[in-house]
Structure formats: C-alpha cells, structure tokens
Image (cartoon, rainbow, N blue to C red):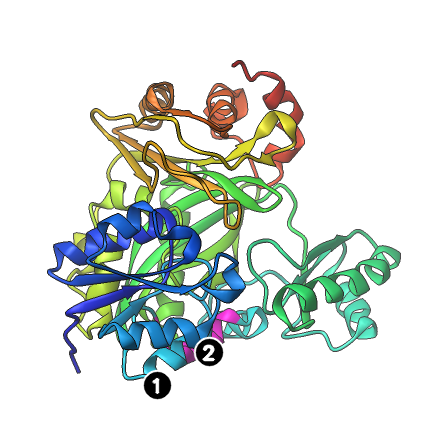
Amino acid sequence: MQQRIRKVFVANRGEIAVRIIRAARELGMQTVLGCSAADVDSLAARMADEVVTVGPAPAAKSYLDIAAVVAAAKGAGADAVHPGYGFLSENAGFAQAVVDAGLIFVGPSPRAITLMGDKAQARACAMKAGVPTVPGSEGVVENLAAALVTADLVGYPVMLKAAAGGGGRGIRVAADAKELEAQYAIATREAHSAFGYGGLYLERFVGLARHVEVQILADGERAIHLFERECSLQRRRQKLVEEAPSPSLDGAVRQKMCLSAVALAESVGYRGVGTVEYLYDPKTSEFFFIEMNTRVQVEHPITEMVTGIDIVRESLRLATGEPLQHNQAEIVLRGTAIECRINAEDPQKNFMPAPGTISELRLPAGPGVRVDTHLYEGYSVPPYYDSLLAKVVVWDCARPEAIERMKRALDEFDVEGLKTTKPLHLALLDDDGFRAGDYHTGYLEANLSRIVSGITD
C-alpha cells in the first residue's frame, strides 16, 4: 500500500541531514530537522522548513533518545522519519517506535533491521540465500570452550566479532588457542560495553583481504544492485577513502558478488536502500559475506556518480511503498568515482580531534567534482560528535584521471580555523600502492607512518 509523505522529520545532523533535506525538497516534501541544542545554528537547521530541538548536546540525550525523537516528529506533524546513518539508523526498536506512532520509517522494516543487525543471524540468512560466508560459527559461540572448538575446525588465525556490532568495535584477532583465550574475555567486555550485548561469533581471519560492498535498492519483492564500492583504505576499521568500482574485481567476480547481494535482499523481503559488505581475497578470487548495513552509507555519493541514481531520493520513494522504478538492465556502470572523507583531525598528531570555528572556507568545483558538507564560514564545529566535515567526491572516465582530478579538487579545498585530514589524502593519492590499486584492509595502517611523513604543509 502506497502512502504519501508530505513532511519528513530528519533525525540526524551534519552533511547527511543536508543531503536528506535536499532530496526531500526535490520530491516536494517539507522538512523538519530534529537536532540537539548544539546544532541549532547548523547548515541543516538553516535549510530545513522547521527546526525542533530534541535535547541537549550529548547524543545520548538527543539524537539517541528514542522517545524524544519520536515525540518531536509526532509533534511536528511529520508523516515520516529519515534516520540517515549512525545514531538510531539501524536500531530496530527505534524503527518500531516510529511505526507504532503511526509514522513512516524511511528504511527497512524492524524485522529486517533485526535480522541483519545481529551479525550471527545475518550470517545464517546469507548462508540460506546461498551467499558465500567466511568459515566460522553458525551463530553466537556460547562460551570460550565452544569458541576453541570452532577455531580448531575452521583453522587459525580467527576473528571474534560482536554479534550486535558495527563500526569496527568488538573485533579481536587470535593467532592461536592461547591468544583466543585472552581475546575472548576482552572482546566480550568490549561488545557488552559498546552494544549492551556481549554475544560473539567467530570466523576464520582472511588476511590481506579487500573490503568491497554492494549497494542495493529493494521494494520488498524485487531488488537490484548499483554495483560495488571499494572500501579497503581504513584506519582502525574506519574508512577514509572509497572508490567505485573496485579496482580489484574482474567482470565475472563483480557479477557474482552483485547478484549474491540481490539474492540476500530478496530472500529477507528487504525494502529500502542497503549495502551488503564482503571480504574479497584477490589471490583466490573468493568473496565472503561480512554483514548488511540497513541504511544509507556515508560513501553513497560515489555510487550515485557512477550510476546516475539518487540513492537518498530513492530511499524516500521506497518508503512510501512505491515499487522499484528501475530494472537491472537499466543500471549502467560508467567511469570511476573516488571519495575522500575530510575529518576535523590532525594526522600528524595521531589524528587528534580538532574542533574549532571555520574562519575561511573555499570549496572545490569544476567538472566531475561534488562536495557533500555542512560547513559554512563562521560555523563552529562542535566537539560532541563524529569528526566528519566534508566528503570530496570526484568522477572521471577512468581511474588514473579520477585520481588526478581528486588531487586538483583537494588543492582547491581550503578550510581555515582547524586542522583536517586533507594533507593525508593528498599524500595518499601519490602513494604507489594506491595509484596501482594494490592495497588491502591493513594497507593504510601498515604504511601510515610512511605516508604521514610525506605530508607537507
């Protein structure tokens, strides 16, 4: 059944809030920004039709307060709530509270969020759908003894992962049984502290792997893919640079991986936008399911650049109950897109956070350049939240040209008043391994000191 969205409540902040407001406006929807007291002067607040303060600066008392957010959305007369990414975006309880309040949740059903949010259940769903999974436990390992037995079966090294995890937290690697005994207790505590649940599952550790993810759109019955993104350049399992398509896949592997993502989405009756993440072993051409993110991803712009599909706009359309507007044959991969995440951090001081006031701002432009940001001159970057300031995105007809275009775009990008990761990105773009497309999930951390040493002010 289709439902109309006249007014959408944006339950987020920063650049993704700006992005949602723009997409909603293009669909003729009014927007209400639900923000903390620290964000009432944000660019998103300036752009929204209405602004409602949901709580004080700390996220736990504002953006993460389910009752406050739902009450604010209901009180504002919104028809729908868009959670963006982070905060409550993958919280099934929040999605259910939105639905129970008679509002539309812009995302998958609470059931789908629950299935895919629990990493052990998601793995079981993937196996049922015929999606390759890393050899490991069939679900949560009940105790250390069970973990040791499973590790002997799959072979060391192994990785312990929080069943309710995300963002790289609650993950530990063990090279042998002795190390597994030590890491099990640590991983359990980390998982419980971060997610309120200490359950762990175990997988074989795939070394020197690539992190590749497939973007999907689905209407509850049918799903399509928008090809893949390469997300292997990470620090502490946090992505810094992404590109589409992956330089490591050939056409046959790409086809298999993308179709497996579609199969998984259709098998769980998925509706909305989502991303299926994989580990890819370039030595064997094997790929394995990691998890499914039931929300729009930070790096969605590069997929938009190579396919021409507005993913955020589609998320709003799909939430109304509309069927997919595209067939798979219509989705064509063109050129290469790269995204550099510009954070308020000092890479020369161990990525120390660097909040401050923007005294001067110059954004890059020109052919094939896009900047998703919430910055403006005079804006004070608050210290309470994620350090992401902007996403500089470029497109060109081929990867070498896209790299040069990104260098040009970053040269034009100027933020005065605080330190950013821009110098790191410029150094990385000249790195031989990156330019050759020869890198893996551990590459940046292994070479970070060398790359940082090449930074010039």
Quadrant of the rendering where the N terminus is positioned: bottom left
Q: How many labels does the image show?
A: 2
The residue nearer to you, when weighing 162 against 173, is 162
**For residue 250, side relative to residue 192 (left or right):** left
Q: What kind of secondary structure does the magenta stretch mostly adopt?
A: helix
Q: Where is residue 267 in the image (x, y as percent from the top left)?
A: 38, 75
Q: Position of residue 344 (x, y in %)?
A: 50, 35
Three-letter code, disc 2: Gly
Q: Quadrant for residue 94, please give it.
A: bottom left
Residue 306 within the magenta-colored segment of the rendering? no
- Residue at 35% over, 33% down: 378
N-terminal of the two: label 1 or label 2? 2
Pick out the residue farthest to the right: 178
Numbered range of the magenta stretch: 108-117
Q: Position of residue 276 (x, y in %)?
A: 43, 59
The residue nearer to you, when weighing 170 against 211, is 170
Pick out the residue farthest to the top: 456
Q: How far apart are marks 1 and 2 (CA)?
A: 10 Å
Q: Do the residues labelled 1 and 2 touch (CB within 8 Å)?
A: no
Residue highlighted by disc 2: 93
Three-letter code, disc 1: Asp
| Mark 1 element type | helix
**For residue 154, side relative to residue 218 (left or right):** right
Residue 333, compared with residue 53, is above or below; it is: above
Residue highlighted by disc 1: 100
Q: Residues within 10 Å of mark 1 (few under 14, many from 20)?
A: few
| Mark 2 element type | helix
Residue 110, compared with residue 84, is above or below; it is: below
Visible in this render: residue 333?
A: no
- Residue at 81% over, 65% down: 185
